[in-house]
Amino acid sequence: MNLPAQGPVIPDFGNTSGCKANETFCWDWFADHWDRFAAELVQHVWVSAIAIVIGLAIALPAALLAYRLPRFETPAVVFSTILYTVPVLGFFLLMIPVTGIGLLTIEIALVGYTLLLLFRNTVTGLRSVPPEVRAAALGMGLTPGQILVRITFPLALPAVMAGLRVVTVTTISLATLAAYIAPYGLGQSILFYIGNTFISGLISAGVLAILLALVADALIVGLTKLVTPWARARRGGA
Amino acid sequence: MTDSATREGPAGATYRGEALAIEFRHVTKRYPGQDAPAIDDLSLTVPPGETCCLVGPSGGGKTTAMKLVNRLIEPTSGDILIGGHSVLTYDVTTLRRDIGYVIQQVGLFPHMTIGANIGTIPRLLGWDKERIAERTGRLLDLVRLDRSYAKRYPAQLSGGQQQRIGLARALAADPPVMLMDEPFGALDPITRAEIQDEFLSLENEIRKTVIFVTHDIDEAIKMGDKIAVLRPGGKLAQYGSADELLGDPVDDFVADFVGADRGLKRLSLRSVGELADPGREAPPGAPSVVAGTSLRVGLSVLLAQGAEVLGVTKEGRPAGAVTLAEIREAAGS
Amino acid sequence: MIVVDAWRFLADNPGRVLGDVAGQLLLSVVSVAIAIAIAVPLGAAIGHTRRFALLAVNGANVLRALPTLAIIAIGIGLYGVGFVNIMVALVILALPLILTNTYVGVAEVEPGTVEAARGMGMTGWQILTQVELPHAIPLIMAGIRTGTVFVIATAYLAGTAGYPHTLGSVITNPTLPVSQLLAYTVLAVVLAFAVDGLLLIVQRAVTPAGMKIVPSTAA
């Protein structure tokens, strides 16, 4: 991953021609500095996406395990619930002595915060399959593997997607804090411009982070509609 | 409607599209930790193409008996044969795909379209797409739903429509045998009567061997060629036609179960035409009904008019008469 | 070793530690209280009238998507640093959870129950306060509890928002020793669990007895 060039010790506000110090937002300045924000935006997407994908890769099999062997559920939920009460930044910083300053620390922390919701929603989804649907599938001669792949998992998808939706915006939000640890994501600009009277930098980074979260949210909503077409079909509809 | 495709069963029988007998041979099912067996030494044979209704009070093991056939429940001892082959010799998955299965709660797959629901087993059997689409269309015709329903989802259908689809899905691979577990029990009385009639005419057409579980003796009388009454403890109390059960219940349990009005029920099974002596003439002023009227309705007419003799007409012309005494005798046990 | 240092740091600075804990609590309580004051009446009104439901649900989803640090950053630009800045961010954090749960809790009362209440001659207000809200209490409380845990676990960002009198005085300062960081992080967790436990007791106390009975699931 390409790191953006670190700003010099004395903040470089570039060519601020036409911009005043106390102006809320200055388009000229933003256009001048678009490259920097674009690089951070792309990083932000990657940092978040990696965490979400790894989170899914861990939470889905774990949920399947807990669905088959319910005694695994309580420890997994207790562990994830405790994690949820830990201030993310504290978690980030405390990880540094173990995993060092860098992407690994960031991802471990971000993945940790994805697990509870993905796990719990998936287990709930798997359990929500109506018993008569399972009974019919079994009686018709579907094997347990076919029931899982063709019936149980598709029917759990709405719950999984609902969890994924919240997890996605949460991860994007938490990823802004990653910049406290290592130079990744839009948090860099936020921390860089904080405490300055020139506030266009703060507004730019903040608005970009919000736009990223909203776009990601909308994408997940669209994806959900695409993969669960039946969820909208009600009587009289379609 | 017959699907010409035939397939080798694992036991070597070629049976697609042709009805097969189901035979229970001394089947016993005992659940671990329970003293009394759920099914106790059950032996009966359902001839090919006939519908056998399993009835009895709850706890009589009728659903257990049915689930033994597709091995959702495994017998403790004894054997069940379909077309002469023991179900225990089949791979369970293959066995179940060869048996149509309909349950009260229908259990349609909510995430699949109606078409995909009906096509589930054909897809697993590897049929090609055109054949599945063709089959789905014909099954929708058969259960009297428009073919456009194939694209809808189960949630968009009424309860009666859903059960029709459940029926179509069970028939999809043209199984020789059908198991139906209180299939119409959740429907309102009007829809139930409608779908019962449709299934009866369907059965005439497709000739499946059906095991039909119900707790409703009237439904059993209507639907069953044969009725098996199970008593608590899973023992077969009586097995026979509705007429035999109503006319000659073997003991008080069966007599109680078929109801104190069994005489009247028995009268519903026969028409006045069957009983009428064509040579007899009804006295002037006697009430008369058409030959196809049930004896039960005939009796009701006699009672209402205080008459002793009931005239019978066929195509508008007199065709004999029935007396009150003859009807009483027909109802008698 | 670090643990001993962390303990020593807490023991040696009782005044500062207590001040920061109190500051964190005050900030969290004020934020959650404002969120409740907005979300519960709004959610109840929408759930009762079923008007603007789509707007409310989508609005809550948008609020839920907003990154807290981004709100702080934009807030610095619009209304400056300090208590208000971090408070606004925390209200936005808690509000959608409480709003959604209140709305769902009120809206999902059995239609038959509401119809029966109306048939008995209850007014809309009586139905809301005597039927729908009591039914919604478990969900509303669940929303408040989750929201509070989130708020307490996030309130340290006050340090970044220019309000130093919270656990953020240490947590948002990466230059301090790890032992101090550990001490304050553990404090934040303990605080979150303590408040959650307290709210659980409140929830049990305010939940109508009939709502506590879990109906046995029919076969």
Image (spheres, coloured by chain):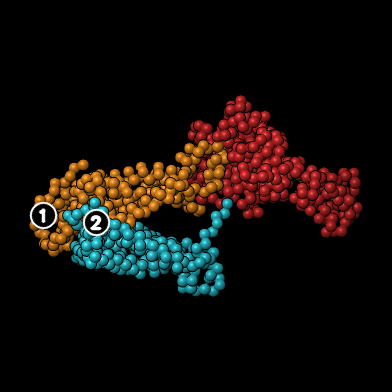
**Which one is closest to the eye, mark 2 or mark 1?**
2
User: Label 1's element?
Assistant: loop
**Given the image, what chain letter belongs to the residue carrying mark 2?**
C
Crowd class of label 2 (few under 14; some 14 to 19; many from 20; radius 10 Å): many
Q: Is residue C49 visible?
A: no
Chain letter, cyan: C
x, y percent for residue C108: 47, 61
Which mark, residue C6? Answer: 2
Disc 2, SS: helix
Q: Nearer the viewer, residue B196 or A143?
A: A143
Residue type for callout 1: Pro
Q: Is residue B33 left or right of residue C72?
A: right
**What is the quadrant of residue C218 in the picture?**
bottom right
Looking at the image, is A144 positioned above or below residue C43?
A: above
Tell me: A171 left or right of A233: left
Q: Which residue is mark 1?
A: A11
Chain A, hue in figure: orange
Does residue A22 appear anywhere in the picture? Answer: yes
Residue B210 horizontal/vertical position (percent): 66, 39
In depth, the one of C205 and B308 nearer the eye is: C205
Residue B237, placed above or below residue C56: above
Residue type for callout 2 = Ala
Residue at left offset 25%, top offset 55% = C4
- In percent of the image, x 31 and y 47: which residue is there? A111
Question: Chain B takes which shade in the image?
Answer: red
Dividing the picture into quadrants, the one containing residue B244 is top right
Residue drawn at point x = 70 percent, y = 35 percent: B26
